[in-house]
Structure formats: C-alpha cells, structure tokens
Image: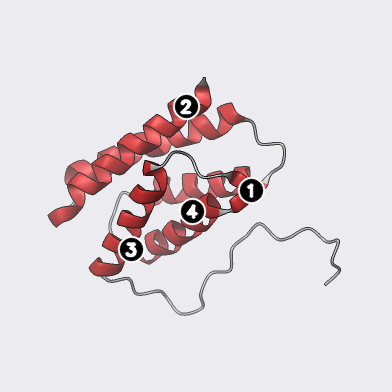
C-alpha cells in the first residue's frame, strides 16, 4: 500500500463473532466513564476513536434489541472524528443524540447497568453541551 494513500475509515470486523462477557462490558463502561469524566478526549490522541471502536465491537456482538441507532450513530461519530473538516456542532449533535439513546437504554437495562449507562448518557450530554458553546 502506498504510504500516501488514505487510511480506510472502516474498522475491520472480526470474521468470528465476538463474545463479550458481562465483566468485559462492565470494564468497558467503567473505562468510558473514566475517560469522559475528565472532559472530552483530545482528538489528536485518538482515545475517543479507540473507545468508539471498542463500543462498536461490543454492540455488534450484543443480541440486545434497541441498539441499532446507537451502533449507527457511533459509526457516524467515528467517521466524523476521522474527518479533518469535522465541525464541532456536528459532533455535538451526534453526542446529544447518543446521550438520549443511551439514557433510553439505561431505563430498561438489566442488572447493574442502569446506573452507569445513565451516567454515560449524562456525560455524553455534557460533552455535547461543551462543544455547542
């Protein structure tokens, strides 16, 4: 591959479906809460993009209904962050929508996921608000 060629924006999907345990999902949720708890990650550092890719893989492996919109919006967010022309208001709109969808999922989440998912929704809303200013 030519070193000047653009990096493909599509993340490779594993050929074998990913199996994600509750413990792994909880750890990912904790990691994301910690990352967003310190404010928005720096785009250049790539932490946000890595987190989006992790969530996309987990959501793709989930058989839980109601996650399609979140999966789609995460994909859009990843593409937007990969674009050098991404406008802050576009990112803010996607984060606000992800916040609303996450809060909806939190309301019906099983077990110990409701609280942390609600917190994630709140942090996503705060991130959207900070970009909207």
Which callout, 1 or 3, points to the residue nearer the camera? 1
Task: Name the residue located 48 percent from the left edge and 44 percent from the top edge.
Answer: 73
Q: Are marks 2 and 1 in contact (CB under 8 Å)?
A: no
Tell me how far mark 2 sits from mark 4, CA to CA: 19 Å
Tell me how far mark 2 sits from mark 3, CA to CA: 31 Å
| As drawn, 2 above or below 31 | below
Tell me how far mark 1 sits from mark 3, CA to CA: 30 Å
Q: Residue furthest top?
A: 133
Q: Residue furthest left?
A: 111
The disc placed on residue 52 is 4
* Mark closer to the chain start, 4 or 1: 1
Which callout, 4 or 1, points to the residue nearer the camera? 1
Res 67 seen here: no
The disc placed on residue 62 is 3
* Mark closer to the chain start, 1 or 3: 1
In the rendered structure, the answer to whether residue 118 lies left or right of residue 6 reads left
* Mark closer to the chain start, 2 or 3: 3
> Residue 25's spot in the image, x, y percent?
30, 63
The disc placed on residue 98 is none
* Mark closer to the chain start, 2 or 1: 1
Res 131 seen here: yes
Foreground residue among 42 and 83: 42
> Residue 31's spot in the image, x, y percent?
36, 56
Tell me how far mark 3 sits from mark 4, CA to CA: 15 Å
Q: Are marks 1 and 3 in contact (CB under 8 Å)?
A: no
Q: Are marks 4 and 1 in contact (CB under 8 Å)?
A: no
Which callout, 2 or 4, points to the residue nearer the camera? 2
Image-quadrant location for residue 20: bottom left
- Describe the element under mark 4 as helix, strand or loop: helix
Report the residue marked by disc 2.
Answer: 130
Tell me how far mark 2 sits from mark 1, CA to CA: 18 Å
């Amino acid at each position: 591959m030519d070193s000047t060629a653009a990096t493909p924006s599509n993340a490779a999907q594993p050929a074998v479906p990913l199996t994600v345990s509750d413990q792994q999902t909880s750890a990912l949720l904790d990691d994301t809460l910690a990352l967003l708890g310190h404010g928005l990650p720096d785009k250049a550092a790539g932490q946000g993009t890595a987190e989006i890719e992790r969530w996309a893989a987990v959501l793709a492996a989930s058989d839980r209904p109601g996650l399609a919109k979140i999966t789609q919006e995460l994909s859009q967010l990843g593409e937007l962050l990969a674009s050098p022309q991404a406008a802050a208001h576009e990112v803010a709109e996607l984060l606000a929508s992800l916040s609303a969808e996450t809060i909806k999922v939190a309301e019906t989440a099983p077990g110990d996921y409701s609280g942390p998912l609600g917190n994630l929704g709140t942090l996503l809303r705060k991130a959207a608000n900070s970009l909207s200013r």
